[in-house]
Amino acid sequence: MRPVLSVLLLLAGIWAGWKFLRYAGSEVSRHERGEAAPRYAPGQLPGLPAALEESLAAAQRAGVDEFRRWLDRHRAEIAEPRLTQIELDYVVRVGGRDPAEARRVLQRLQGRLRPDHPQYRRFQELSRAYP
C-alpha cells in the first residue's frame, strides 16, 4: 500500500508543478505583450479602470440621465468598492429629482453591502435621508 501512495504523491507533485509552470508561462507572456492588470486612478477607491475615469467625469457633468446611462453601460466593468461609491453618487444626484429612484438604488445596494465595506457609513446616511 505504501508504494502506491508514494507513486500517487509523486504524480500529484509532478502534475501540480506542470500546472504552475503553465500558469507562470502564460502570465509572463501576457506581461510581455503588455496586457497588465487594469490600472486604477490614484487617490480613488479601486475598481474603476483609469481609462473610464474621464468618461465618468463627463457623464456626471452632463446630468443625471447621462450619468444613469453611463452607469448602466459600464456597470460590468466596475468592481467593488468603487461601484458602490459611484452608485451612491448617483443616488445623491437623482435624489432631489426622483426620490423613488434613489430609494430603489439604495434597496438594491442594501443586499450586497456589509458593515466592513468602505462605503457602508455613507450608505447608512443616505438610507436615512431616503426612507
Image (tube, rainbow, N blue to C red):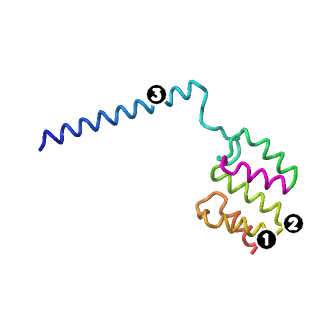
Return the x and y of residue 50 as percentages of the image width and height: 71, 39
Task: Name the element at disc 2.
Answer: loop
Return the x and y of residue 85 as percentages of the image width and height: 71, 55
Where does label 3 land, which residue?
25
Q: What residue type is labelled 2?
A: Arg
Q: Residue 29 carries which label?
A: none
Q: Is residue 38 above or below residue 71?
A: above
104 horizontally vs 14: left or right: right
Task: Name the element at disc 3.
Answer: helix
Where does label 1 land, which residue?
100
Q: Residue at x 56, y 28 (%)?
A: 31
The part of the chain drawn in magenta is 64-78
33 horizontally vs 6: left or right: right
CA gap, disc 3 and disc 2: 53 Å
Indicate yes or no whether the magenta region holds residue 65.
Answer: yes
Q: Which mark is residue 97?
A: 2
Task: Name the element at disc 1.
Answer: helix
Dot 3 or dot 2, earlier in sequence = 3
